[in-house]
Image (cartoon, helix red, strand yellow):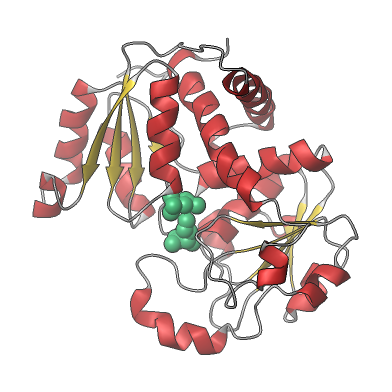
Amino acid sequence: MSKKLKHYLQFSNFTADEYAYLFERAALIKRKFKAYEKHHPLTDRTLALIFEKASTRTRVSFEAGMYQLGGSVVHLTTGDSQLGRAEPIEDSARVISRMVDLVMIRTFEQTKIDRFAEYSRVPVINGLTNEFHPCQIMADIFTFIEHRGSIRGKTVAWVGDGNNMANTWLQAAQLLDFTVHVSTPRGYEIDRAVAGVRNDCYRVFKDPMLACANADLVTTDVWTSMGFEAENEARKKAFADWCVDMDMMRTAKSDALFMHCLPAHRGEEVDVDVIDGPQSVVWDEAENRLHVQKALMEYLLLGQL
Ligand code: CP
Ligand code: NVA
């Protein structure tokens, strides 16, 4: 197997220089897309999309993105493939990766995608696991840069669950030199060992209002992530004070942005005035999944151009 094979399994897989390249490339790809200019670097290449959990944004952005790059897509789910009938992940990886050029997987444990990557002949992209959601954070940071410039030295307030998004924000903070102010209910804290980061890239606050103080960006996510539905009722009680509202936005900087990876539950993790208000950039954030992932696929297959 080639030593040069690159996967994107967690945010920390790339260096700050690689992100600088990807953000520049995503901006170019976005400009061309908006101008209806053809950009077909991946003609005749095929992407396999494997979904073991539901998706709207990830599926549309990868599928549309690959076609827009000149390639094509094969879509698999647990229910309509042998993945749901206990074919070993290593065997699936060996077979699928002999037939396509690139694989994106959305699954449960990170160990599953790690094992797939180990046996894959082609690059593997994490489209969300229980632990990480790197493509989303890449889009979020690209969106921040578009609106406010460099994220270096800035403060991001994370209000809510210590989940896959939170872990990925921590990795990004360590790599790109900003700080995350984390506030989670008791029992739903982040686990630094999962993110594998130093303790100087984030600060923990019991009170979400304090986490938002002077933040440049306030961000949250659903109270119950996919795979944790059995905890829904307990989480609704525990998270009641972790709803991003206008009071929290007012303690942040006056030009603070609001982000949410979506899907959102208005009235739970975020108030309608915030997500549908002037500081919210959630639609740009969702759209940018398309542009950054096109840059990512191009990079994994062709390197820096
Ligand atoms: N944000 C995100 O990954 O959305 P989907 O679950 O719709 O893909
Ligand atoms: N944390 C959420 C993100 C959904 C895009 C989940 O894992 O369900």
> Where residue 290 sits: x, y (%)?
52, 34
Image-quadrant location for residue 4: top left
Q: Quadrant of the C terminus?
A: top right
> Where residue 138 sits: x, y (%)?
60, 40
Image-quadrant location for residue 155: bottom right
Q: Is residue 171 left or right of residue 257?
A: left
Image height of 246 relative to 256, above or below:
below
| Residue at the image point whose x is 72% and y is 70% from the top | 273
Numbered circles on residues, count? 0
Q: Is residue 267 visible?
A: yes
> Where residue 283 sits: x, y (%)?
62, 48
Q: Is residue 197 visible?
A: no
Q: Is residue 129 left or right of residue 175?
A: left
| Residue at the image point whose x is 20% and y is 44% from the top | 89
Q: Is residue 267 left or right of residue 62?
A: right
> Where residue 270 sits: x, y (%)?
64, 71
Image height of 201 relative to 152, above or below:
below
Q: Quadrant of the N terminus?
A: top left
Image height of 57 relative to 14, above or below:
below
Q: Is residue 184 left or right of residue 257?
A: left
Image-quadrant location for residue 27: top right
Image height of 20 relative to 166, above or below:
above
